[in-house]
Amino acid sequence: MSIQFDFLPKEYHQTNLRRRNVPWLVSMVLLVVLVGSGGLVVQMGTRRQLWTTYQQLTQQCMANEVKLAQYQHQKAKKRDALRKARLLQPILLGYPRSWLLEAIVSSTPEDVVLDQVRLTLKEEQQVTESQEAPVDFLRSGSGGSADKATEELIRAQEKLSRAWIEVVIDGRSVSTTAVQDFCSQLSHFPVIEEINLQTVEGMSNEKIGQGSTHFVLWGRCRHLPPPAAFVRPDQVPAMTTGPLANVGRHGSKANLP
Amino acid sequence: MSTPMVVLGKRNMVLVAVVAAITIALIVANMALGYRNTMLRQSIGALRSRIQGQEVQLLAEKASDPQATEIEDFLTDWERRQIDVKSISEFTTQLAHEATSAGLQVVRITPDKWSTTGWLSSCPFNLEFRGTFQQLLKFLRHWDYVGKAAVIHGLDIERAAEAGNNLQIRIKFTVYGEKLG
């Protein structure tokens, strides 16, 4: 066992220890600075990338907004066009009167002579609940901003679209059966929703002839019939039963001049 | 004594403080940047979901509307068929010509006054012809075929005389057109 004696002063040891710690301290400081700076560089790089992505996405979003605004504008235009088209429907899509007359003349039996045919457009005065739907549709989308004149136009066109064509046929026949058949033939056309024999009266022998019958038929059909009823008279299948199935089908036998 | 203060000595305190300050500054800067990056990521996420929604909406809007072409055709047809104040005299002449071509004898063509409701103008007409039923049918077929914007309100066909095949025909109709100006 040996005894060591330290004769060096305490300050010498402190200075020695400080000198030995300097590299360690320097390396620690460098490490902290490097890690911190490296972190900052990475964060800034990430931020640059994220910013670029953000800008690209913002541009895309704005472009989409513009496209959507264009589509909305087009949609609004289409809605206006649809509303206009619906208002014009009763003007352009009414049941052709030539078809109606063809239906009448092709249904006229040989024994029937027509004296007068009257077609009158009549607007319906009373509106039922179920019929109010088209009005609501015409007004929808206007956002309540439609002015008084437009409202008036909508009402007028609505009345026209619900209008009925009243058919009054005044004629003569030697046979009452022929009149019944005439009525039955007319009711065969899908466009004619109602047909009634309004008046039947016997006529004097001196005036027309023996056993002559004067009659008035009253019927009605819609100005804008449902699509199923919107058919040409010659497309309606001929009645296969009854003695007058083919009488006047092509209008040739009708007793109108 | 082995405490750092003692080990480093008082004269190195400034150096330690500077190092500590640099360290704290670096940590704070990193945290601030990290926070901003996180916020940016959140904004990007929100933007992406917004764009996704927009693209779904765009796809739905892009899907063709089959009714659109139909409406467009209908309105083009209306443009062709409408009758306005300017074309009324031409229409009247054409009407008389068509009736004559069909063999009808024109008695009277009387246009009434124009009236306007909203953007739609209308003019009532009264027509009176004489002729046979077949002539009338020919005229009406042509009328329906040409398809001017007109609605027949009244059609009255009556025998002109007890004997003979001449008919007296009265037609009340209204022509329509868009208000000018």
Image: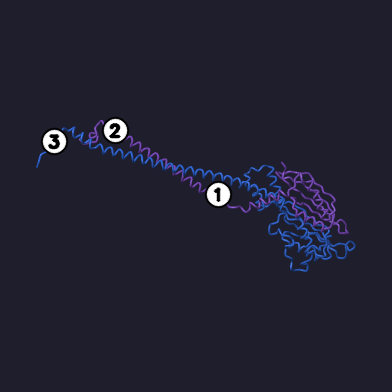
Q: Characterize the local packing of mark 3: few (<14), some (14-19) or many (20 or more) Cα atoms within 10 angstroms.
A: few
Identify the hue of chain A.
blue
Q: Residue A157 placed where, x, y %?
A: 70, 49
Query: Which residue lies under the disc numbered 1?
Result: B58
Residue A193 appears in the rendering: no
The residue nearer to you, when weighing B80 against A98, is B80
Residue A48 appears in the rendering: yes
How far is disc 2 from disc 1 in space, using C-alphas?
A: 63 Å
Image mark 1: chain:
B
Kind of element beneath mark 3: loop
**Where A172 falls versus B126 (above or below)?**
below
| Residue B15: assigned label | 2
The extreme top residue here reads: B11
Q: Residue A7 placed where, x, y %?
A: 13, 34
The extreme right residue here reads: A206
Q: Identify the residue at horizontal 28%, vertical 37% (top origin).
A: A26
Kind of element beneath mark 2: helix
Mark 2 or 1, closer to the camera: 2
Mark 1 or 3, closer to the camera: 3
Q: Are marks 2 and 1 on the same chain?
A: yes
Do the residues under discs 1 and 3 have CB atoms within 8 angstroms?
no
Kind of element beneath mark 1: helix
* Type of amino acid at the residue the image marks with label 3: Asp
Query: Which residue lies under the disc numbered 3?
Result: A6
Q: Characterize the local packing of mark 2: few (<14), some (14-19) or many (20 or more) Cα atoms within 10 angstroms.
A: few
Q: Quadrant of the N terminus of chain B?
A: top left
**Where A163 falls versus A172 (above or below)?**
above
Q: Quadrant of the C terminus of chain B?
A: top right
Letter of the purple chain:
B
How far is disc 1 from disc 3 in space, using C-alphas?
A: 89 Å
* Type of amino acid at the residue the image marks with label 1: Leu
